């Protein structure tokens, strides 16, 4: 079916309209948010927090106010059993209306590969399109588990096809799209020691990052804080880095806006978590060792 140009394009001199966003500076309404990080750094936690904040209309990380409108979300797991994610959700105690966040795992959906040996899998795509109907958010975890074939992760054409297919399924249903993916191994510097990549940290083909609308790297710093660092974003330019502190008990994150207050909060959360598992004396000693906080400061913060 043909479309007139006036319904598809705009004159170049027309006023500029920014791409729509569901979370300004972080999650575009169309396209996708790609979050890359090492195994167990907390990518799934962040994805669940985003889903919870959107579904419950609560501030993300206790600070970012979101627009309402998300009533249903779909989380598609490609590696782990659904019970793993359910257990993580239960531990965090994140809020969401009943039956608003749905999880599908590889045991319930064994043939979940959207691209196999360079070819799109139409039936798999059709099933996900059916499930995505009525959702305003679709999360895929992790990217590489939805493709199958020899050395496919390093094939630019196949990985571009995979990312476009995943995004199309979500966007065609009117849903925003989040894709979690693994980070590649660090390169070796001239001294033979691991050197972190500044760009193209996603494991596999460079086309993954080139094609994505938004790319954030997630990592844990030497100071114990977790950071989402923006690699690219086609939309509103918010702060390049979101610094987060993780409660060791609930695993939930809080956005850091003041470093001194964050260190105090980190200390108290660690201390409370350890004190529930051992004597207060041992908990205090271990917390001071882990954070480097002197005894006088620790006593003042506890009081």
Image (cartoon, grey):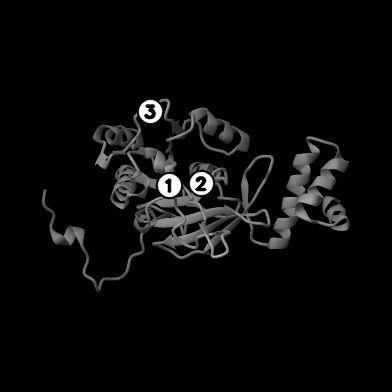
- Which of the two residues, 38 or 63, is positioned nearer the viewer here? 38
Q: Residues within 10 Å of mark 1 (few under 14, many from 20)?
A: many
Position above or below: 153 against 238: above
Which residue is found at the position 26% from the left and 40% from the top? 120
Q: Residues within 10 Å of mark 2 (few under 14, many from 20)?
A: many
For mark 2, give the secondary structure.
helix
Give the residue pinned by disc 1.
178
In space, the residues marked 2 and 1 are separated at their CA atoms by: 10 Å
Name which of mark 1 and mark 3 comes first in the sequence.
Answer: 3
Name which of mark 3 and mark 2 comes first in the sequence.
Answer: 2
Give the residue pinned by disc 3.
109
Instruction: Answer whether labels 1 and 3 touch (C-beta < 8 Å).
Output: no
Q: Which of the 4 quarters of the picture holds residue 252? A: top right
- Which of the two residues, 126 or 157, is positioned nearer the viewer here? 157
Question: Left or right: 275 with respect to 154?
Answer: right
Furthest-top residue in view? 108
In space, the residues marked 1 and 3 are separated at their CA atoms by: 19 Å
Name which of mark 2 and mark 1 comes first in the sequence.
Answer: 2
Nearer to us: label 3 or label 2: 3
- Residue 224 position in % (x across, y down): 67, 53
- Residue 189 position in % (x across, y down): 54, 63
For mark 3, give the secondary structure.
loop
Furthest-front residue in view? 191
Furthest-left residue in view? 2
In space, the residues marked 3 and 2 are separated at their CA atoms by: 24 Å
Nearer to us: label 2 or label 1: 1
For mark 1, give the secondary structure.
strand
Give the residue pinned by disc 2.
50
Instruction: Answer whether labels 2 and 1 touch (C-beta < 8 Å).
Output: yes
Whether residue 138 is visible, yes or no, is no
């Amino acid at each position: 079916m043909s479309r007139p140009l006036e319904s598809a394009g705009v004159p170049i001199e027309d006023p500029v309209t920014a791409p729509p966003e569901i979370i300004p500076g972080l999650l575009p309404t169309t396209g996708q948010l790609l979050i890359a990080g090492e195994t167990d750094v907390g990518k799934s936690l962040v994805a669940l927090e985003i889903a919870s904040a959107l579904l419950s209309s609560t501030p993300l990380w206790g600070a970012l106010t979101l627009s309402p409108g998300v009533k249903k979300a779909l989380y598609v797991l490609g590696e782990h059993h659904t019970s793993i994610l359910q257990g993580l959700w239960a531990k965090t105690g994140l809020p969401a209306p009943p039956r608003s966040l749905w999880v599908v795992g590889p045991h319930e959906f064994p043939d979940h590969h959207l691209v196999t040996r360079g070819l799109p899998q139409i039936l798999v795509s059709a099933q996900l399109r059916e499930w995505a109907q009525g959702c305003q958010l679709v999360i895929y975890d992790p990217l590489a588990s939805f493709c199958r074939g020899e050395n496919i992760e390093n094939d630019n054409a196949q990985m571009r096809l995979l990312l476009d297919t995943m995004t199309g399924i979500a966007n065609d249903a009117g849903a925003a799209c989040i894709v979690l993916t693994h980070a590649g191994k660090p390169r070796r510097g001239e001294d033979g020691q691991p050197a972190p990549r500044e760009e193209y940290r996603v494991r596999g083909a460079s086309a993954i990052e080139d094609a994505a609308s938004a790319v954030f790297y997630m990592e844990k710093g030497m100071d114990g804080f977790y950071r989402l660092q923006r690699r690219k974003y086609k939309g509103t330019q918010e702060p390049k880095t979101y610094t987060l502190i993780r409660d060791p008990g609930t695993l939930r994150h809080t956005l850091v806006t003041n470093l001194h207050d964050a260190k105090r909060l980190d200390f108290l959360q660690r201390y409370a978590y350890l004190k529930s598992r051992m004597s207060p004396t041992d908990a205090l000693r271990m917390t001071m060792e882990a954070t480097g906080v002197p005894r006088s400061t620790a006593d003042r913060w506890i009081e």
